[in-house]
Image (cartoon, rainbow, N blue to C red):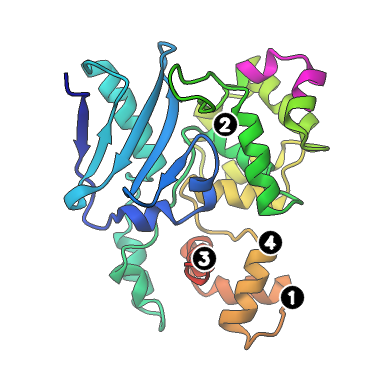
Amino acid sequence: MTAPSFVIEPAPQFDFRATVFSHGWYMLAPFSWDEETGTLSTIYRTAAGAVLSLELSAPERRLRVDLPDLDGLGADLRDELEALVRRIFSLDWDLRPFYAAMRDFDGYDWLEAEKRGRILVGGSLWEDLAKVLLTTNTTWAQTVQTCARLCQLGAPHPSLPGRHAFPSAGQIAALDFDVFAEALRAGYRNAYLYELAGRIAGGGLDLDAWLSLDSEGLYSAVKSLKGFGDYAAGSIARLAGHFDRIAIDSACRETYALLHNDGTKGSDADIARHYAAFGQWRGLVMWMDIMRRHS
């Protein structure tokens, strides 16, 4: 019996590879990228508790979702999985106003030509919060390793050894802190992530409600969390589709120096002034500059 699949017709501005490589999240569990086949896979625990592998590809510019673990696909599960995939690829973002605005700036025609602008995100706001926290004050190599250890605490796939769904906040909160800290080995972030999971699992934080906040509301909400400063709050705002502020880190500083300041390091105030010219799109332009430099 052929495993089920379905196709999502994305907007004309969608490009699969540009979105996959728009963010380092494709390197972080539960994602896995296969360059040979051009397939991004992820492991997902459904609302009903099944742990599935999703294989995501884009033949003929259509977004295809293959489900090798299933014999059939009911309507409810299909809707759940489509919502997941739409979130992961930021499919509901309308980039037409962004492209129109960028036509007024020299040197950015590649954004529209290459269909850049969408960002790969996690399967939930909780996942993005956890991963952003694990990028702070550390190297990217350490982030990859720490996220892999975190994902090992999630539900295992029944037939793919070593592959796990991203753990829910409830799964983390149910662990003894010492067990969690020993497994994660993320230094001071252990306590911050554990507290965050506990507040979500206990009902003290409603992340679904956060998704309806405006940019300022979401930024302030994230900054209220222990361990989340300006960089982390700005990063989460960008992943949620709010681009009116920038998140300055070492990658941003290096990119600004190389692309916009003749290789000379500028202050954070210099960087903020430069990107302020892009108005409500400043955060997205900054991020696209960074990813362009690394592509």
Say if residue 203 shows up in the picture. no
- In the rendering, at what x and y percent does residue 30 appear? 51, 34
Q: Which residue is mark 3?
A: 282
| Three-letter amino acid code at the position of disc 3 | Arg
Q: Which residue is mark 1?
A: 267
Q: Which residue is mark 2?
A: 126
> Which image quadrant for residue 224?
top right
Q: Are marks 4 and 2 in contact (CB under 8 Å)?
A: no
Magenta region, main secondary structure: helix
| Three-letter amino acid code at the position of disc 2 | Trp
Q: Earlier in the sequence, mark 4 or mark 3?
A: 4
Q: Nearer the viewer, residue 52 or 249?
A: 52
Where is 206 relative to 120, above or below? above
Q: Nearer the viewer, residue 22 or 142?
A: 142
| Three-letter amino acid code at the position of disc 4 | Asp
Q: Secondary structure at mark 3?
A: helix
Report the Cα–Cα distance between label 4 and label 1. 11 Å
